[in-house]
Image (cartoon, helix red, strand yellow):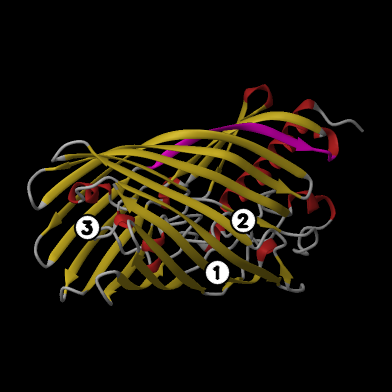
């Protein structure tokens, strides 16, 4: 018996919701939500407690107002190697490892140019969000029969933040900065076992920052706005009457970030900084999707804002060498009601160590970070698939999820 056009549209709509929604929610294990806060090697060594440290070139990417306190032009380039292991043990099933790449290379760059005594221009390039997971077919026993097409498979987001800014020194103790952020989402892959979704897009935002410095104390604030990236791509399935490839478009709201820090110099060689950061994941609330024939649908995610508490310490062994230590406690924005197995998120503690050494005209920085992520167990009483095609927060994902994360960073910087 043939399905009506309405039925075919309903099937297509259901598959698009399932494929796109659970994929967007799933890229969240490497940091709170799907965030990657390590945007400089110096910052990694201090567990990202770097918004109030005027002495570090690596702090400019966190707080561009710091540029105004550096008299020379500065160039820094670095990379982060991230190693990630994830496994799932569904209730009544076997333990399965995610089969995506277990190592990722994430570059970063910062350039500042002082044009007058009080004005400095800067350009940051980094990747503050993203990463990748892949689950083999049959990982989650609840997806059986016709629902197998909605079982998560491959999720990936690659994006680049290009952030020009200007810093103005108001007086000998205070500076402010402002800038424009361009998020280039170059590649999105959100696949289920019977659905392939791919696309790309971009969006603009803005940032503000300030720094106030005294002899022993520095106070810094950095705000980066939310960014709405408009996405265009394709939806492909070989299952049922909806078989074919269709144009699809949507948007993804990246959260705003507010980081406040206070640094204290205990001696000429030793300082400590404490930061609090709020990430506004509440904008990741509803995804509205448009697809073939201008149909629209939406899915509610209801993420929460999340707080991170960061502590960093720097000790100068000599005039040319610094040691760095850091600790951070990051909370998860993802409630059980919208839990997704596409890289499950949970509270984590970050432990880091770093070193910086000055050579002739160059500074070499290196850092290591270990993220101790709490295991997450879901025991939802919401039965799947009786609630519809979206498995997030349902019994389809009941089980235990474990992950380990290690990061290694290296960078070179110079002044001229």
Circle on res. 54:
3
Whichever of callouts 2 and 1 sits on the residue coming sooner in the sequence is 2
Residue beneath disc 1: 405
Name the residue at 49% across, 71% down.
Answer: 371
Callout 3 secondary element: loop
Q: Which residue is mark 2?
A: 392
Q: Quadrant of the N terminus?
A: top right
Residue 366 placement: quadrant:
bottom left
Q: Which mark is residue 298?
A: none
Asked if the residues shown at circle 2 and circle 1 are in contact, with their CB atoms under 8 angstroms apart, the answer is no
Magenta span: helix, strand or loop, mainly? strand
Q: Nearer the viewer, residue 192 or 353?
A: 353
Spot occupied by residue 137 in the image (x, y as percentages of width and height): 80, 58
User: Which element carries disc 2, helix, strand or loop?
Assistant: loop
Residue range of the region highlighted in magenta in the rendering: 226-239
Q: Residues within 10 Å of mark 1 (few under 14, many from 20)?
A: many
**Element type at mark 1:** strand
Q: Residue at x 37, y 40 (%)?
A: 163
Marks 1/3 in contact by CB < 8 Å: the verdict is no
Closer to the observer: label 1 or label 3? 3
Q: Position of residue 260 (x, y in %)?
A: 25, 58
Q: Can residue 128 be seen here?
A: no
């Amino acid at each position: 018996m043939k399905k009506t056009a309405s039925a075919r549209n309903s099937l297509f709509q259901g598959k698009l919701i399932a494929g796109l929604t659970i994929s967007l929610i799933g890229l969240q294990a490497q940091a709170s939500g799907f965030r990657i806060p390590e945007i400089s090697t110096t910052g990694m060594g201090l567990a990202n407690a770097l918004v109030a440290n005027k002495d570090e070139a690596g702090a400019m990417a966190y707080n561009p107002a710091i540029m105004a306190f550096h008299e020379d032009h500065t160039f820094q380039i670095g990379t982060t190697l991230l190693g990630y292991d994830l496994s799932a043990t569904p209730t009544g099933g076997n333990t399965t490892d995610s089969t995506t790449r277990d190592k990722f290379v994430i570059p970063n760059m910062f350039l500042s140019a002082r044009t007058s005594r009080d004005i400095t221009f800067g350009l940051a390039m980094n990747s503050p969000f993203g990463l990748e997971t892949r689950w083999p077919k049959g990982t989650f026993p609840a997806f059986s029969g016709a629902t197998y097409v909605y079982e998560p498979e491959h999720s990936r987001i690659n994006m680049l933040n290009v952030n020009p800014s200007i810093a103005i020194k108001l007086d000998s103790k205070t500076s402010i900065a402002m800038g424009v952020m361009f998020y280039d989402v170059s590649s999105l892959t959100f696949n289920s076992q019977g659905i392939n979704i791919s696309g790309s897009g971009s969006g603009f935002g803005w940032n503000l920052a300030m720094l106030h410095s005294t002899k022993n104390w520095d106070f810094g604030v950095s705000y980066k706005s939310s960014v709405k990236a408009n996405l265009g791509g394709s939806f492909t399935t070989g299952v049922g009457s909806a078989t074919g490839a269709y144009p699809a478009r949507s948007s993804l709201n990246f959260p705003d970030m507010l980081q406040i820090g206070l640094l204290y110099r205990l001696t000429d060689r030793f300082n400590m900084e404490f930061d609090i950061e709020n990430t506004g994941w509440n904008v990741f609330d509803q995804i509205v999707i448009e697809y073939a024939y201008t149909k629209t649908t939406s899915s509610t995610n209801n993420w929460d804002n999340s707080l991170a508490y960061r502590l960093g310490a720097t000790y100068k062994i000599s005039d040319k060498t610094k040691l760095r230590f850091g600790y951070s406690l990051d909370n998860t924005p993802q409630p059980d009601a919208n839990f997704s197995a596409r890289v499950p998120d949970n509270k984590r503690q970050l432990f880091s160590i770093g070193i910086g050494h000055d050579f002739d005209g160059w500074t070499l920085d290196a850092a290591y970070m270990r993220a101790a992520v709490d295991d997450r167990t879901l025991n939802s009483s919401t039965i799947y698939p009786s609630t519809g095609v979206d498995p997030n927060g349902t019994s389809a994902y009941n089980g235990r999820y474990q992950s380990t994360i290690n990061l290694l960073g290296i960078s070179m910087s110079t002044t001229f």
